[in-house]
Amino acid sequence: MRITYACTACGSTVTVNDAETKPSLVCSRCGAVTEIATDAIAWSGPGGEPAEVGVGEPRLRRCLVCPCTELFARKDFPQRLGVGIVVAGLAASCVTWAQRLLVPTFAILFGTALVDVILYLFMPECLTCYRCGTRYRGAAGPFEGFDLETHEKHRQQQARLAGRASIGPPASPTP
């Protein structure tokens, strides 16, 4: 399993290979150590029955970086590249439409849609933590697709915590 996360100490992006075999995650920039909880990964053997640690397939139960148990499955594809493909297809079809070339316009639009479908079918999935955004490639777990309600819950929680941090500690009463 390969994970990519933001270091809680310095904020730099850290990538760790074979994270399921390590007792902790270490930031390559600042050296901050994040301990991995022993119950975060379950091992399953053939047929799905429980197996010993290090034997069988690792299955995530929760995030390795934060204590969140809510993760979602998504396609492991850069969103900016996907938007770039769609925008390029739209721009090219607008040019051909302005020149009144009907067949090339629709050929470009259908070609862009075909590229999108092919990428969707062949891109692997990864798991992403709602709370900290850690991505798990090559990991399995009992997690479903993106849920806007769960995302909004975690987004609002982060906004409240950031608001409290900006206010500062409560003032002590003066006698």
Image: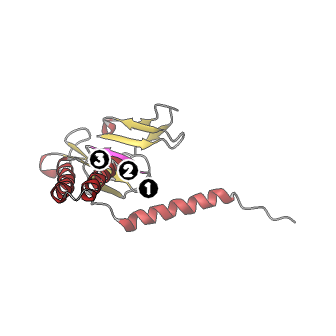
Total label count?
3
On residue 77, the disc is 3
Residue 125 position, x and y percent, is: 25, 49
User: Quick one: SS at disc 1?
Assistant: loop
**Residue sitting nearer the eye, 167 or 79:** 79
**Residue type indicated by callout 2:** Cys
Residue 128 position, x and y percent, is: 35, 52
Real-space Cα separation, disc 3 to disc 1, in angstroms: 20 Å
User: Quick one: SS at disc 2?
Assistant: loop
Query: Label 2, on which residue?
Result: 63
Q: Residues within 10 Å of mark 1 (few under 14, many from 20)?
A: many
Mark 3 vs 2, N-terminal side? 2
On residue 2, the disc is none
- Residue occupying the point 21% across, 53% down: 112
**Which of the 4 quarters of the picture holds residue 167?**
bottom right
Q: Residues within 10 Å of mark 2 (few under 14, many from 20)?
A: many
**Residue sitting nearer the eye, 86 or 27:** 86
Mark 1 vs 2, N-terminal side? 2
Left or right: residue 14 versus residue 74 is right
**Residue type indicated by callout 3:** Phe
On residue 131, the disc is 1
Residue lying at the far right of the rendered structure: 175
Provide the major secondary structure of the magenta segment: strand
Q: Residues within 10 Å of mark 3 (few under 14, many from 20)?
A: some
